[in-house]
Image (cartoon, coloured by chain):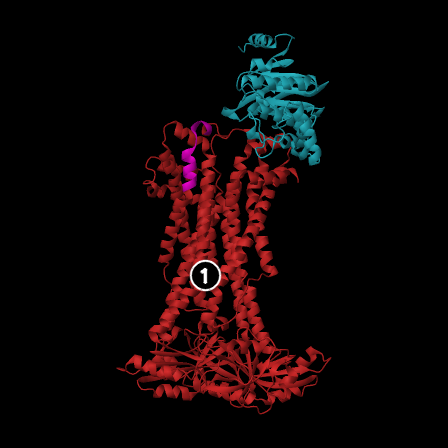
Amino acid sequence: MSTSATLAWRYMRGRPGRTVLTTVAITLGVALIFGLNGMLPGLTDLFTKTLFAAAGQVDLSVSSQSGGTFDPGIASKVSAVPGVAVATPSVRRSVGMPNGTPVNIITLAGIDPRTAPRVHSFNVASGRLLNDGDAGSVVIGSDTAGKLGLHVGSSWRIPTVAGTESFNVVGLLANGSSPSAPEVYVTVGDAQRMTGAGNTINTVEARFVPGADRTTVEAAVRRKLGSDYIVGGLSNESTLLASVKTANYMFTFFGLFALIMGGFIILNTFRTLVSERRHDIGMLRAIGADRRTILNIFLIQSVFQGVLGTAIGITAGYLLTLVALGFYNPFMRSILHINATVSPSYTLGTWVAAIALGIGVTVASAVIPARQAARITPLEAMRPQIAEVAERQRSAWVLLGWAMLVGCVPMLFSAQVSLVGLGAFAALAGLVLVAPALIRPLAFALVWLVRPFSPATADLSSSNVTRQPGRAAATASAILVSLALVVAILGVVTSLYAGFFDYINKSLGSDFVFIPNGLILGGSHVGADQSFVQRIADTPGVGTVATMRLGQAQLGAGQVQVVGIDPVAYPKVASFTFSQGSGTADIAKLGTGRTMLVNGITAGQQGLAVGKTVRLQTANGLESYTVVGVATDYLNAKLSTVYISQKNLENDFNVTSNVLVLANARPGAAKPAVKAALGRLVANYPQFVLYDSATFKATQSQIFAQSFVVFDVLIAFFALPTLLALLNTLAISVLARTREIGMLRAVGTTRGQVRGMVVAEAMLLGAVGVTLGVAGGIALGYALVYALNATMYVMPYYFPWGGIVTAVIAGFSFALLASIIPARTAAKLDIVTALHYE
Amino acid sequence: MSIVEVSGLTKIYGSGDTKVTALDHVDLCVDQGEFVAVMGPSGCGKSTLLNLVGGLDKPTSGIVRIGGNDIAEMDDATVTKLRRRRLGFVFQFFNLIPVLDAAENAALPLTLDGVAPAEARRRAQEWLVKVGLDKRLHNLPDQLSGGQQQRVAVARALVTDPDLILADEPTGNLDSKSGDEIADLLKVASTEWNRGIIMVTHDVRIASHAQRIVFMRDGKIVDDVKMPSGDGAEAARAAMEKAGLL
């Protein structure tokens, strides 16, 4: 090992406490990046498996551009294309199973028994495959049969649009099936009847002749079918994969924030190391160490710390993944009804990000102090340091900070998402830059807060905070970022909570709700036909009934959900949250011509506003629809959605089945009795769950609380650096002032007063950090809520009082906690030793 | 033969009203194997002279030649290399690296110069044995007494076989017995190991170990006395009285 490396390593070992504190600062950020992203490959794998299991081993898959159904003759057209050996038509739909069934969702696949075995490789474990005209028979995977306790010859009831129907299990397949929604094979005819698809299909799958050029054949099929069809696509559920990608960015962003906080702590640590080792640096320079050797000592130490912190961070991250999945797997089972377990898995990108950022941020934070150390001349270093010299203020940076703070105000109110985001960044960066200049005024202004802790030495504490504005500012910056995130996240959660319950009250505010098992309308779920709705309406005590139906369309380059409502009945039981338009009158407009409401995501993505006309790719070709309002309902808040009349949905998309039913009780009717009657009715439609209004809200509240546990964990993670930053700075401060503390004790300061002085210093630093953090958090929270409003959910902005209270409590509690050890160390110092401390 | 030649050396700090002349046209030569003590009251320029000779500071004017080369003309890298290879330093507060053991501390100038660690350690241990620390090779500085720490510092100064050792108050932080031992050690370094030594000290008894004492006052050399054999301390005291320093 070189001299620099040896010294770096020995210095690290020589100060284990400092090494641990610095390492923890790095570990936190790396653990967040590595731990949270460790869940994603498993989730991606789950979704991908679902997609590929659905696609099987086919060479080509054809679906409608709109996502809807089409004529079975398309299969013949595909098989006529040169290079295609065989094409088979199929109907594929998700079916929600009754609550308590070991398999929550199945993929009902209606196949043509003559052609499907030539396209798919079915591996029969027992029984047989379907035969032509084999009505009422079903073939399933052995694993699924095992879960359901079925075998060849069993009878199995499957939900259909007309209630459950009994099927005879004729064969079991050895093939592995999708973990989240296993395939269940019936004949096309059965599937069409079960899903209300009439004589239409929604998929054609094909095999190529051996040796055919894949690209050429695909192009030929595309030419033959025209632009109304997607050829070779597996894009139906790509929104799920896109969500995983977004989560990846978010988690890395959170981890990066944590590392930035760690960076401030490391910066302070290395500044202090340079200060502590001035004499060593002087001696080394005197006996012939050049500047590079000195620089290398600190840089190599930062690499050691970075590697150590990253290694521990990766281990901690793995544990975090396990804990997070421990929460998430049951959540998937109970809420999303996906019966699969996701295991920790890490992509190369996650490894690279964790290692590069962990070591990179540590080394980057050490560069400035290391360069300062290398610039010290031997003579400067050997001179005795009587007291810490006040740092030169970098006024240019402070001026830039003020400019950013002034500039962020118009940006935050610009009503443009990118500018609002930039405004929040400018606010945080501006606060970090002006922090050194604000330390003195804030410390003096807030000194009254700490007088109760140390009446005699409060002013001394205030001076101690301000004598090293750079160090105090770095500490305050770490606290600022930490608490700003706490304030912002809590603010967003508050707004989200309020927003969602506003949606629920408006869009699902009826007395009774029949809702799909998985709470997701999309995914081609099998709903119920009109006879089910009629039976609900005929139930004694039931008043108005309204439904939602669901189709898919292509709008521009993207897919949108098309929700069909009855413009007359729907407003009587529910409403939308409007961001453009007025309400019932706009819903009524859906009854005239081809008009639509669009939700916030669609409006944002497609740049739509009231009055604009767009071309929708429907199941029956391109049609022009005019936007009459921008509105969102609860269940479709997360997906790009348009709302049209059920009449238009039937004409343009061939959809007549209902995926959501809302019903009100007649005035004066006994709701429990009505609910009991409806409960008996829904027993034959297990793809639906019946809720009354209060239960539904309570369930949603519980789901909300469960899914936001991750935010609580994040808040804890982000608050922790406050403690670390304070602990580190106070330890450094006491060490650097050892001689002064000795002098104070020598002239009569009691141990208690010394203790009080350090506690007061901690509280003052905490107060400065809290002040800056709350300011930054308000800006960041506002920007996040604004961005969510513009791109996803419409939600009211709530001033983050809860976040501010949490930040104040966290800031001061951590300050008190962080001061305990340094205060005790300072109070216990031996006077003579302290006076001779070098 | 002179290993150090100082000519017209002047160092002025500050300017205008705050101007302080720390050294004022000082001339001095030190020969190979010569042990020179520099004495004088606080602020007379002793340490400034040592720092300029050691290349730790730049003179305002004048020349410092080591081995015939003017170090004032050298850039930082060259003068650093010269310090590493041709000069040894002993400080009042020992200045050992607290996380390295005695052998590692003594080997530092060699390892900084790229000598293989095993070889550097071997040579450092030889010197530690010579200065009487054969049983303390692996002790950390805080496990050594002040005198022992200063012996390590002397071994560190000698390990590169330098032409000149610069010692700034090497006994200032030691009790009288340890101080005498260090002074004896420096004397051995000059007489037996043929090193030139410039030692700044306040202590007459310590200075008496030198072959020559240079007296300074107000930045100037006011006397330069070759020590007679016999009772050095008495001779030094007499010389100081002669120079008007007592």
| Position above or below: A555 against A448 | below
Tell me if I can see residue B47 in this picture: yes
Q: Chain of mark 1?
A: A
Prevalent SS, magenta region = helix
- Left or right side of A311 for A735: left
Q: Quadrant of the N terminus of chain B?
A: top right
Q: Amino acid at mark 1?
A: Val
Judge whether A707 appears above or below B38 on screen: below
Badge 1: few (under 14), some or many (20 or more) residues near its Cα, within 10 Å?
Answer: some
Q: Which chain is red?
A: A
- Measured as percent of width and height from the top left, residue A106 is found at 52, 78
The structure residue drawn at horizontal position 45% and vertical position 38%, both measured from the top left corner, is A733
Residue pointed to by mark 1: A710
When the figure is inspected, residue B246 is found, relative to residue B172, above or below; the finding is above
Which of these two is toward me, B170 or A142? A142
Residue span colored magenta: A820-833
Residue toward you, B159 or A422: B159
Query: x and y percent of residue A694 in the render?
Result: 33, 73
Q: Residue at x 59, y 48 (%)?
A: A307
Answer with the quarter of the image where residue A781 lies: bottom left
Q: Is residue B158 left or right of residue A472?
A: right
> Circle 1 sits in a helix, a strand or a loop, which is it?
helix
- The image shows residue A780 at horizontal and vertical percentages of 44, 57
Question: Which chain is tinted cyan?
Answer: B
Furthest toward the bottom, the residue is A133
Quadrant for residue A819, please give it.
Answer: top left
Q: Is residue A826 magenta?
A: yes
